Amino acid sequence: MSVSRRSRWTLMAGLVLAIVALSALWYATREGPGPQVPAHGGRYLEAVVGSPLRVNPLYTAFNDVDKDLATLVFSGLTRLGPDGTVLPDLAESWEVSPDARVYTFHLRQGVTWHDGTAFTADDVIFTWSALSDPDFKGEPSLGQFWQQVKCAKKDDFTVVCELPQPFAPFLAYTTIGILPRHRLEGLSAEGLFIAPFNEQPIGTGPFILRALDSQSALLESNPSYHWGEPAIAEIELRFFSDYGSAASALRDGQVQGLFLSPETSPDILGQLEQDKKLQHLASRRNSYTLLYLNTRTPPLDDRSVRQALLYALDREAIIADRLDGRAQLADDPIVPGTWAYSDDVMSYRHDPQRARSLLEEDGWQINSRGVLEKEGEELRLTLLTDNDPERVAIGQEIAQQLRAIGVDASLQSPAGSELVRDFLLPRHFQAVIYGWDQGYDPDPYPAWHSSQAQERGFNLAGYSDENMDRVLSQARQTSDLEQRKALYREFQQIFAEEVPSILLFYPVYNYFIDKEVKGVSLGVLFEPASRFANVHEWYVKVKRTGSQPSPQPTSWRTPSSP
């Protein structure tokens, strides 16, 4: 039986399609599943404002440059995901006892220090013992915390920690970089603080520090890194004294990246935004600026007054006019983008008419001076801030907006040290513009639980509410993440209804980086060094030398994904 020409063509086309499909499948699977990045190579240079002091994770609270370098050189037992979820790092897994007081960490085996020595539980115990040393020279609150934790080695790859009481944020504390016992054993707290190791550190992180001086730090990829060798072969951090000179170096092509703080001049930001060779990444910090209201003094002990003040403020105008858009409107004490945030909680928008109505319903009336008055008392409000020009400008704008609804508002701006000593700590204020850094864990207990309203506590608003206390206490005692989420949603609702203080904005940080650098991803920033959270996944196009045509990547590999 003969086969027609059309039938033969159909059979040939089918055969070709089958071959193409099989070839595609082979190419897709021959290197295993997962995202692929260009093969190892290339160099990345970043401008950094400041200079290093001690590249040691125990002391990085004092210096952002130290933290940048420590993030590249060291690893913790855990690490933070883009939304702040605690993920495995040097610890493969952990269990929490039913009473939420005992944590058992199972360490990753086969990890080596940059000098080739094996990483074990001894290194973990050494590091955490150094933190709990009564003579610890780092951040005092960090040492005080670790003094309450009892940790012991069960075997070479198991560490058990016992807490005096349940404390869910504990896992976030285990992100601190681990030190090598074999390099530092026997040093006193003072000896560790001044050790030459702090200039020639050895870690288990993605990069090895090869050279460090007052001008720059040169780091080389760690071929034994437990998440796979980084694609970029070398990173250099070049130190600058100010953002102006650093930005000039970036525009001139001397460096490939620059991370800007929210305080950076709008002129510098605008110039970099216009540079076509740069990609612009922006992310909010896990912190906020707010107008603390002293809820223990009239008239701010009245919820209707606090709500009215919030309605009266055009916070978006403040961000646009006083901050040149370098911030995002803050509606919630749980920062958006973090795992604890719920987006279905009520928020307030500028509504001066609603503000006046609330005050009228509460008995306030405009008097002959154009000021709100109730039972013979005028609604007067003294705002405080430090003498930073930007915060003074924000304070002036807030006072002006409050005067527009009949509040007799004025501004005072003592020096920063005086503001804290004479007004904040003794709670001698009505309203103050200040910032709150949430840290690694979303736990709002320190800022809003009534037990923290004492002079040395951080509940500066002096706010007290039984329901809020209950929610905050329960949330820090459960290790069940979903239960914590539900409790924090309840906290958000209480905060929105009660308005214990007025949230203003979340600071926004801007990262400018050459478009040839790929794979950079910013989540919520828990500190400036959070920009390096996935640095082992970054890559650059590797240019060939000589007469060879330049590049399309011809070699690819699949990274080890955390």
Image: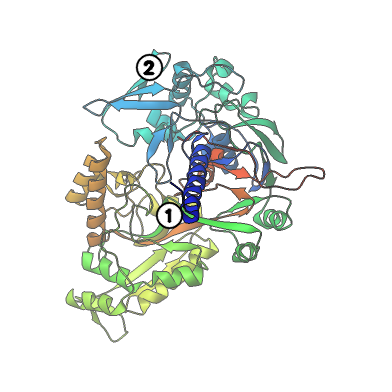
Q: Which amino acid is tagged 1?
A: Gly
| Rendered location of residue 3, percent (x, y) | 46, 49
Q: Depth-wise, is mark 2 or mark 1 nearer the camera?
A: 2
Q: Which residue is mark 2?
A: 152
Residue 546, can we see it? yes
Rendered view: 167 above or below 338: above
Q: Residues within 10 Å of mark 1 (few under 14, many from 20)?
A: some
Q: Which residue is mark 1?
A: 435
Q: Which amino acid is tagged 2?
A: Ala
Instruction: Give the left or right position of residue 115, taking residue 329 as reference.
Output: right
Residue that protrudes farthest toward the front in the picture: 1
Residue 95 position by quadrant: top left
Instruction: Give the left or right position of residue 362, taking residue 420 as reference.
Output: left
Alpha carbon distance from label 2 to label 1: 38 Å
In the image, 530 versus 89, the foreground residue is 89
Instruction: Give the left or right position of residue 329, taking residue 43 as reference.
Output: left
Rendered view: 497 above or below 14: below
| Rendered location of residue 209, percent (x, y) | 65, 31
Of the two numbered discs 2 and 1 on the same chain, state the one appearing first in sequence.
Answer: 2
Q: Residue at x 65, y 24 (%)?
A: 196
Q: Residue at x 29, y 65 (%)?
A: 347
Residue 399 position by quadrant: bottom left
Badge 1 marks a residue whose secondary structure is: strand
Q: Residue at x 43, y 68 (%)?
A: 411
| Rendered location of residue 51, percent (x, y) | 65, 42
Residue 485: give its label: none
